[in-house]
Image (cartoon, coloured by chain):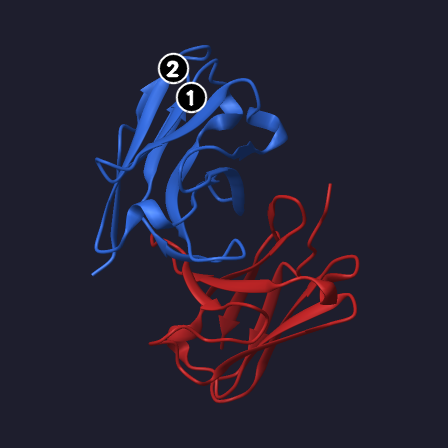
Amino acid sequence: EVQLVESGGGLVQPGGSLRLSCAASGFTFSSLWMAWVRQAPGKGLEWVAHIKQDGSEKDYVESVKGRFTISRDNAKNSLYLQMNSLRADDTAVYYCARDQGHSTYGAWGQGALVTVSS
Amino acid sequence: SYKLTQPPSVSVSPGQTASITCSGDKLGDKYVCWYQQKPGQSPVLLIYQNNKRPSGIPERFSGCNSGNTATLTISGTQAMDEADYYCQAWDGSTVFGGGTKLTVL
């Protein structure tokens, strides 16, 4: 069974940092692109970032470029999102998602809530 | 940046057919996915590559994509289909539509 389990969410002050993790199981993690997608309270889905199988290619939504870093550890079947200089508008549930090809997200984690507030 | 436009809401009576549209420039040239999200739950992939259903997705869900519009069709809509629906495409980066709230009444 495919499982994606996020952790690391919480309350952080504006300007602070947080690191999200996503533990993957039930599939060959190293063979697929992975992504982070977020959803602000009461809002729609927003793609945040994705990373190639070997980590050699990464891309980000414009609003997080220079502040967020996506990475992965294939030996640990884990995906990460380092978030720095957090702002109030980064408040959202962050989902880890498995890209099964052509940016098709066939599996999602349960989400991790990140709240940026003083 | 590329934009996908969905109607904010659609209503349908039980047993009837619901259609949810997703519009974007030359969308028919791209692959479109559709996701269903119920309150408090993670999104679920319903349709990928315009019209393919993952295993476990009921046949009443279908998709098509042509010109500037992709359409998700739900035949014989059930009360359990009440949810938010999102289209998604790739245009250099992944883009989601704003979402459509389907009400079954």
| Mark 1 element type | strand
The residue carrying mark 2 is A17
| Residue found 66% across the figure and 60% down from its top | B6
| Residue found 56% across the figure and 76% down from its top | B51
| Mark 2 element type | loop
Badge number at residue A83:
1
Q: Position of residue A38 (x, y in %)?
A: 46, 40
User: Which quadrant of the rendered structure holds the N terminus of chain A?
Assistant: bottom left
- Vertical order, B29 against A98 (above or below): below
Quarter-of-image position of residue A81 = top left
The residue under label 2 is which amino acid type? Answer: Ser
The residue under label 1 is which amino acid type? Answer: Met
- In the picture, one chain is red; tell me its letter: B
Q: Position of residue B28 (x, y in %)?
A: 73, 67
- In the rendered structure, the colour chosen for chain A is blue
Chain letter for the residue marked with disc 2 in the picture:
A
On screen, residue A101 versus residue A109, left or right, reads: right
Q: Mark 1 or mark 2, which is nearer the start of the sequence?
A: 2
Q: Position of residue B29 (x, y in %)?
A: 73, 64
* In contact (CB < 8 Å): disc 2 and disc 1: yes
